[in-house]
Amino acid sequence: MTKRRWQKHFISDVFSLKSESHTTFSKVVFKNPGLVKSKKKRIPKTLFKFYAPTSSNILDIRKKRLWISHPNSFNDPFDCHVGADYENYEKHSLLKHIDKTGFTEDLGGFTKKDYRRIADSKTGVFPHPLSKIEEYSSVISNILRKKSDDLVKEMDKVRISTNKEVSKKMDKIREANIRVASFANLQSNNYPPDRNDMERMIQMWAHYSDNHKGFCVEYDISSLEPGNILQTYDSKNGYESYSPEKNINLLILAGLFPIIYSSYRVNVPRTKLEKLTIDKDGNLINKMGIDEILYKAFITKSTKWSYEKEWRIILDGRICSYFNNKIPFPFIKHIYLGSRMKPEIIDDLIEIADELNVEITLMELNEKKFTLEHQNINSYKWDKEKLSWHNPLL
């Protein structure tokens, strides 16, 4: 497996073991826990997650749990949004229609030459002016310009119907009950992270922690190493014999991936879209391979986001629902407080850090450089105590 694309190989390996179209990623992993062995040495020791300073987020830290989001709530409309080549689907629908209705040599219908031009045209490309390759939309536009009004109306109906069909199928695909939790990987040997690490994260403090008013949690996930997970996992007894908390750790490891940054989105192939149908209850039929495509789409993002060094946990929605979309996540190692956090929230998180026996650090702006500094929490407590000396009520 290539170093850069091992994630897709792992996903393909899981879905290759599906025995039925309705078998989920989770059930395949439960039945084949040894699959996670291939992740040995690929999992980082720690991951970081940024939070807005909401009461819900703070309570989740106290309860040592992790919210798993549905992609519909993401700010980036491209994120987890699997694509499709609508024009390619339309092109082949038109060719099928012509095959069914036949050719005519007069200007009122399609000729064999028209058919060949449409078949040889390309979608999703912008050919060089000197290239012999023709772009589909230009070809069909030029051909129909010379045809009868009746034929143009007939083709418009086919094209409209085809695009509605694709849209309906894609909407159903995008409704898939798969949820995600995102993290940042500092890829550093410094724990806690040094100044250079945090410099790279300033944008994330602004984007994901309410402009530095929130906090960041460092999670030590070293216990999720495949050897640790499999050591006590007896596959002979089956996953039903274990607690939900034990099983969820296996699924977390199986669903944990670094993001692949690319200029291209993951698309559903036309051939798979053509086989898909929607029954009277709105369920997708013949969707073999669609879940695999979705999982790959969920770990692919634009290169513009590469600075985040993102990792994700991807879980089946039904698993998340069992935990009310907040899975047990007892891996908290360190809490970092934003430089603009309100004092009352600082006090709450200091109390929580004491309860959980984890480290806590207050971030502050460097006075000379565009960097963040670590302020020892004892210094904050001392400054707070000094303020009490000047209490005007005493």
Image (cartoon, rainbow, N blue to C red):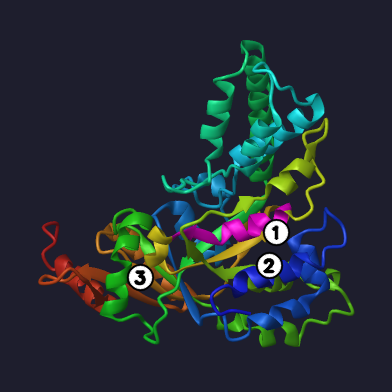
- Mark 1, secondary structure of its residue: helix
Q: Position of residue 376 (x, y in %)?
A: 26, 78
Closer to us: 82 or 258:
82
Q: Quadrant of residue 84?
A: top right
Give the amino acid type for the residue marked by disc 1 in the picture: Glu
Left or right of 151 in this view: 27: right
> At 37% across and 63% down in the image, what residue appears?
215
Majority secondary structure of the magenta segment? helix
Q: Are marks 1 and 2 in contact (CB under 8 Å)?
A: yes
Mark 2 neighbour class, 10 Å CA radius: few under 14, some 14 to 19, many 20 or more: some
In the rendered structure, does residue 295 fall within the stretch colored magenta?
Answer: yes
Mark 1–mark 3 Cα distance, whole angstroms, equals 36 Å
Mark 1–mark 2 Cα distance, whole angstroms, equals 7 Å
> At 10% across and 72% down in the image, what residue appears?
368
Closer to us: 76 or 142:
142
Q: Quadrant of the N terminus?
A: bottom right
Question: What number is the disc on residue 292?
Answer: 1
Q: Position of residue 20 (x, y in %)?
A: 87, 57
Residue 323 makes an appearance in the image: no
In the rendered structure, does residue 211 fall within the stretch colored magenta?
Answer: no
Please determine whether, in this image, residue 166 is positioned above or below residue 329.
Answer: above
> At 72% across and 52% down in the image, what residue appears?
290
- The residue that disc 3 covers is 336
Q: Nearer the viewer, mark 3 or mark 2?
A: 2
Range drawn in magenta? 290-302
Give the amino acid type for the residue marked by disc 3 in the picture: Tyr
Question: What number is the disc on residue 11?
Answer: 2
Q: Position of residue 302 (x, y in %)?
A: 45, 57
> At 30% across and 73% down in the image, what residue appears?
198
Residue 97 makes an appearance in the image: yes
